[in-house]
């Protein structure tokens, strides 16, 4: 099956790659939504990580936000071979677009040229009043980050519960012009991100492959389905591609 996927990747001029938490776990970042993840430990986390709670109590929001995302905010993580493989695909393609659920910024750290951060990013925050952007270093330099221009409490650029998805149209546009869809490391449980494979298959008529450790509810949408460890699958894919 992976040989077939490698052949499709080799022939495609433009590829869209959808990625989820499974891509970053090899970098040591936990899957917050897995059965053993942080979100399953305490359902109230979803309330505290909501846009409603930010506007209700922005000071306490930042306290909880930094606690919940502490491991990611430490920025001790670096791109792993999966991120690097996606970057390598660019070498002989017109375009490789990454559409990621992950907010850790590792695709950009791996120098992928076209990245759509579907759920935003932990790497910066913006002022909800004047729109000024601030780096993660500034956010972490103070307990509650305030805008230096207007004094409002900054809002993280990660998508909070209750926020509107703003990247969906951009993601669909990227799919429209691609030849092949590769989906990796996601259970495809989160809407509307999980509608993108539907769009690729039913609206665009694109061939698609899924590589994920566990079966997903969307497996039927894919021409090629591989249930295996992502890191070892990528190692095999890289080997197959080099022989083509």
Image (cartoon, rainbow, N blue to C red):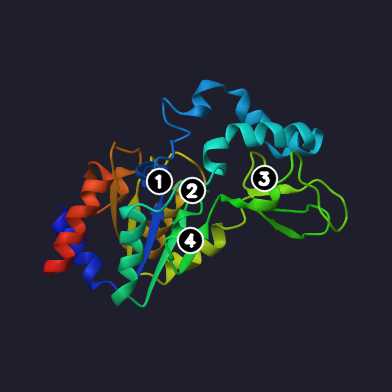
Marked residue nearer the N-terminal end (3 or 1): 1
Residue 217 appears left or right of 76: left
Residue at (61% x, 28% y) in the render: 45
From this view, report whether residue 79 is shown above or below residue 29: below
Q: Are marks 4 and 2 in contact (CB under 8 Å)?
A: no
Marked residue nearer the N-terminal end (4 or 1): 1
Tell me how far mark 4 sits from mark 2, CA to CA: 11 Å
Q: Are marks 1 and 2 in contact (CB under 8 Å)?
A: yes
| Image quadrant containing the C terminus | bottom left
Residue 219: give its label.
none
Q: Which residue is mark 3?
A: 140
Q: Which residue is mark 1?
A: 24
Q: Which residue is mark 2?
A: 102
Marked residue nearer the N-terminal end (4 or 2): 2
Q: Which residue is mark 4?
A: 108
User: Viewer-proximal residue, 95 or 201?
Assistant: 95
Q: Number of callouts in the render?
A: 4
Q: Nearer the viewer, mark 1 or mark 2?
A: 1
Secondary structure beneath dot 4 equals helix
> How many residues crowd around disc 3 within 10 Å: few (fewer than 14), some, or many (20 or more)?
few
Quarter assignment of residue 179: bottom left
> How many residues crowd around disc 4 within 10 Å: few (fewer than 14), some, or many (20 or more)?
some
């Amino acid at each position: 099956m992976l040989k077939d996927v490698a052949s499709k990747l080799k022939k495609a001029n433009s590829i869209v790659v959808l990625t989820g938490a499974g891509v970053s776990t090899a970098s040591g970042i936990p899957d917050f939504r897995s059965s053993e993840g942080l979100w399953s430990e305490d359902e109230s986390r979803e309330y505290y990580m909501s846009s409603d709670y930010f506007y209700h109590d922005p000071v306490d929001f930042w306290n909880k936000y930094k606690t919940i995302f502490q491991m990611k905010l430490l920025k001790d993580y670096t791109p792993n071979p999966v991120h690097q493989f996606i970057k390598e695909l660019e070498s002989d393609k017109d375009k490789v677009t990454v559409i990621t659920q992950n907010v850790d910024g590792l695709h950009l750290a791996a120098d992928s040229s076209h990245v759509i951060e579907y759920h935003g990013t932990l790497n910066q925050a913006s002022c909800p009043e004047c729109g000024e952007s601030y780096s993660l270093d500034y956010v972490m330099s103070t307990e509650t980050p305030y805008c230096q221009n207007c004094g409002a409490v900054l809002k993280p650029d990660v998508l909070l519960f209750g926020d509107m998805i703003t990247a969906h149209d951009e993601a669909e546009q990227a799919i429209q012009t691609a030849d092949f869809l590769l989906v990796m490391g996601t259970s495809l449980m989160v809407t509307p991100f999980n509608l993108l494979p539907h769009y690729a298959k039913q609206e665009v008529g694109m061939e698609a492959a899924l590589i994920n450790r566990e079966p997903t509810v969307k497996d039927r949408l894919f021409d090629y389905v591989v249930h295996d460890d992502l890191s070892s699958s990528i190692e095999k894919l890289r080997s197959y591609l080099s022989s083509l």
